[in-house]
Amino acid sequence: MKTAPIVAARIERSPEGLPFAAAFGDVYHPRAGALEQARHVFLAGNGLPERWRGRARFVIAETGFGLGNNFLAAWQAWREDPQRCERLDFLSVELHPPSAADLAAWPRDPAVAELAAQLHAQWPPLTHDLHRLSFEGGRVTLQLAFGAAAAWLPEWVARVDAFFLDGFAPHRNPAMWEALFKSLARLAAPGATAATWSSARAVRDALRGAGFEVDKAAGSGGKRDISVARFVPEPTARSTPPGRPRVRPVEPRALIVGGGLAGCGAAWALAEQGWHCTVFDRHAEPASEGSGNPGGLFHGIVTPDDGAHARWFRAAAFAFAPLARAALADGVPGAIDGLLRLEYELRDLTAMHERLACLGLPHEYVQALSPEAASARAGLPLRDPAWLFSEGGWISPRGLAGWLLRRCAVPAEWRGGTEVQGLQRDGEDWCLLDGNGGVIARAPTVVLANAGDALRLLGANDAMEWPVQPVRGQVSTAPAAGLHLPALPLAGAGYVLPPVAGRAVFGATAQRGDLDASVRLGDHEENLAKLSRLLSSSSLLEASALQGRVGWRWTALDRLPLIGAVPDASAAGVGSADQPRLLPRHEGLFMFAALGSRGIVMSVLGARLLAAWVTGAPAPVAASLMDAVDPARFAARSRRKKLNSTRAAPAGT
């Protein structure tokens, strides 16, 4: 998906005192009131709250978030309903979202004032991303897509139970309505309903064309008729592709292999969805291998083209910051005071500002700083300009992993000191095996979060061709006394942290395929050279006096993780698909691995995406980003290459 700068709404006051969108020449809600419209048209028009009662999950999708009144009305109705569904997921898209100031400025009905304050407190930066906001301990979620509906609706991955077809009038905003009608049938769950204040003939005909039965209902607030509809798909309608999350009628219980940051994050995210997890690890304590360093960085990135890497890590940074604040408040070592990433190539500050303007990245996410301004933030002289990620910082990965495990909404079981030597399918279950072939545990759902060892468990048929390999990294540490360390994390060619428990932590080396576990003097010297470059000064340390730690970061060649259902290479017809979402999968087998050098920042988003795969919840990222991290992407790319070479071959060969 191509991103574009987001332009905030210009909200004026109409002669009647209503919020008025100058860009569309229309009001945000009728004179009768926003809540009156929301309750009569969108809630009652979709049979709510009755239809969500007794459900584990209910998904609402809205076109045109506006000032959020429909979401607030749905949230309030959910709160007040003693028979409410366990989880309410609300998706919405908005081309011109309000600024945080405008969101707070418009008066709210007293019935939703407290909810509106919670919404304002979590209001995200205005970037072309899918922003996930969480309320009621994760039982109510709002996924806000900022940008054009034509770009976003094809990117939603969800099974929608009710559509709130809001937005400005069809003749004033035709692009949104056209995009909507193209996506309705793909998104609609069986029995889905839709409601809109519009009774225009074109809207009703388009709903019928999308597979809905349409009726008129009485309007309110001076509106004579509204339209209500129910999805009645053709028997031959296409089902969910194999490479997409879907609800499975299984016990909400998962076995997770690997107790590092990925495994503990997966347990936490699945517990957020009401699942019970058992985590197996060969070590007695969590995060004893790749996640065991004393501290690590988290931040987003900026690239000229804003491609999949930039969008993935930006989404990951947005998802991680709120959780990091909660973990730090609970005593996990770290700080979220910002992070400086030195810019070695684009050294002209004007060019850096132009890049941010072109990408539409607001200062709440990243700022371009001169060497002088960066020096002031770091508290020491720097010779390079820098990107300041204000929501970046550092944290103890081991502390975070343990905290995630303790914070599971459904308590997780820890099975340390357990070697999983094999994986086997037995009927509807997956079995974890010990060295003698005995069954350690069995369940319909297994998550492999054990880095490179996941490839061994999958075996040659499913994983041998994946371009994933270990990258050895050595971190150096020394007493911080007498050293002039930065006030916030500093990254570039290497990194250095503020003092961590009285020690300097810096590094790190990166050697692909190197399995040497010993701490090497030459690697300390390499880390000292990186430290000197970062601090623009000669090091006062001797390599022989340093201590260090060696770990391995399993990394795919495209530097993106492996998150999703494991593809089944042996399934019939696998060679006919050239898109990840079309490849067949092993039922109930998932993975969350190859997090590479940025495992901390992607731990929350990756875990929630993994949980969406397992439970069928709406995906927290765009479909194109799901494809980018899908374990099936390698097989799909191989297939595309074969197809392209076949097409390019001369006739008769």
Image (cartoon, rainbow, N blue to C red):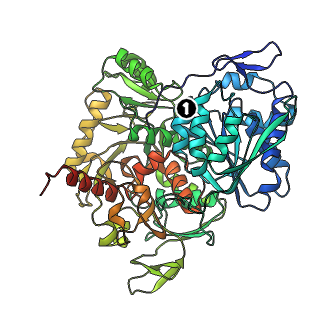
Q: Quadrant of residue 219?
A: top right
Kind of residue at badge 1: Ala
Does the image show residue 126?
Answer: yes
Is 612 situated above or below 395?
below
**169, 514: nearer the viewer:** 169
Q: Residue at x 38, y 67 (%)?
A: 454
Position in image of residue 371 (x %, y %): 36, 19
Is 25 situated above or below 273?
above
Does the image show residue 469?
Answer: no
Q: Is residue 257 left or right of residue 123?
A: left
Q: Residue at x 56, y 22 (%)?
A: 7
Q: Is residue 60 left or right of residue 464?
A: right
SS for tag 1? Answer: loop
Is 85 situated above or below 429?
above
Residue at numbered disc 1: 148
Q: Residue at x 76, y 34 (%)?
A: 69
Q: Is residue 351 left or right of residue 320?
A: left
